[in-house]
Amino acid sequence: MAVDGTSVALPQFLKKIELIKQGAEARVYRGSFLGKPTIVKERFPKLYRHPLLDEKLTHRRTVQEVRSILRCRKAGISAPVVYFVDYTSHCIFLEDIVGSITVRDHIASTQLSSAQKSPEERLDQLAKKMGQILAKMHDEDVVHGDLTTSNMLLKAGGETELVLIDFGLSYISALPEDKGVDMYVLEKAFLSTHPNTEALFEKLLKAYAASSKKSHAVIKKLDEVRLRGRKRSMVG
């Protein structure tokens, strides 16, 4: 089924495709758009907010998400193609990366494998690639806002084809602190999801530092955020 570009047709279209996820901010569907496998992200109204404020905030989030994706793609960073955006219903139609696996699942399966090499050695190239891509993203002043290994995909056919997804909390910022917090979020998610991978994350950071033109200030801010986090933990 195709969408004619009007908000009137969208509710009927969404009813006919598969709802795969519903979070606090949006519903995510999988279907076909113009003959292509497509992910549709629909930001729905938040009834606890004033309607005018909700519309303003939702519109801003949709604009920021699309802008971040397009900025990444223009810089040569793999992210889903944006097929169509409806700013009235706050729906984004995105390329469905068919046959991909999340970095989270890839790391977990590698750690469970019985290969002779240690999992960390086998994952070194992936960690290096992740660091390089995130450095490139931050050099474009894109802050992802929700960096986890679930929001990175590996295309079928190899570890080198890394795709960043789910830019729903992203925004544009040149501030080192925003980028440092971005990396801190990733570090916390990485180490809690993948135990005993501290050395692997350090390799990711090393690749990030070597690849980013602005890495010194970002790593400095990351260290400051880490210190604040440890102090809060001690007080708690």
Image (cartoon, rainbow, N blue to C red):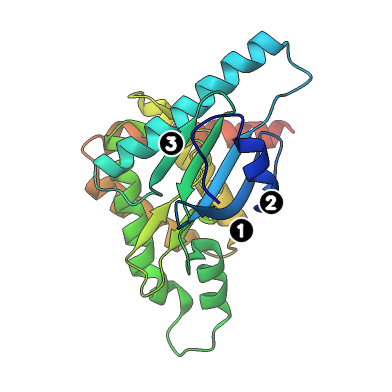
Tag on residue 97? none
Q: Earlier in the sequence, mark 3 or mark 1?
A: 1
Q: CA distance from mark 3 to mark 1?
A: 20 Å
Q: Is residue 47 above or below residue 126?
A: above
Mark 1 is surrounded, within 10 Å at the Cα level, by few (under 14), some (14 to 19) or many (20 or more) other residues, namely some
Between tags 3 and 1, which lies in front?
Answer: 1
Depth check, mark 3 against mark 2: the one in front is 2
Q: Amino acid at mark 1?
A: Thr
Q: Nearer the viewer, mark 2 or mark 1?
A: 2
**Mark 2: which amino acid?**
Leu
Distance (Cα) linking label 2 and label 1: 26 Å
| Element type where label 1 sits in the image | helix
Q: Is residue 69 visible?
A: yes
* Three-letter residue code for mark 3: Leu
- Residue at numbered disc 2: 19
Left or right placement of residue 50 versus residue 99 in this view: right
- First in sequence: mark 3 or mark 2? 2
Whether the residues at callouts 3 and 1 have beta carbons within 8 Å, the answer is no
Seen from this angle, which residue lies furthest left?
213
Which residue is at 43% across, 36% downward?
222
Query: Does residue 36 appear to the left or right of 21 in the view shown?
Result: left
Measured along the vertical axis of the image, is residue 62 above or below residue 15?
above
Which quadrant holds residue 139?
Answer: top left
Please identify the quarter of the rendering in which residue 192 is found.
bottom right
Residue under label 1: 193
State the image quarter where residue 137 is shown: top left
Please give the residue where the numbered disc 3 appears in the rendered image: 222
Q: Is residue 185 above or below residue 231?
A: below
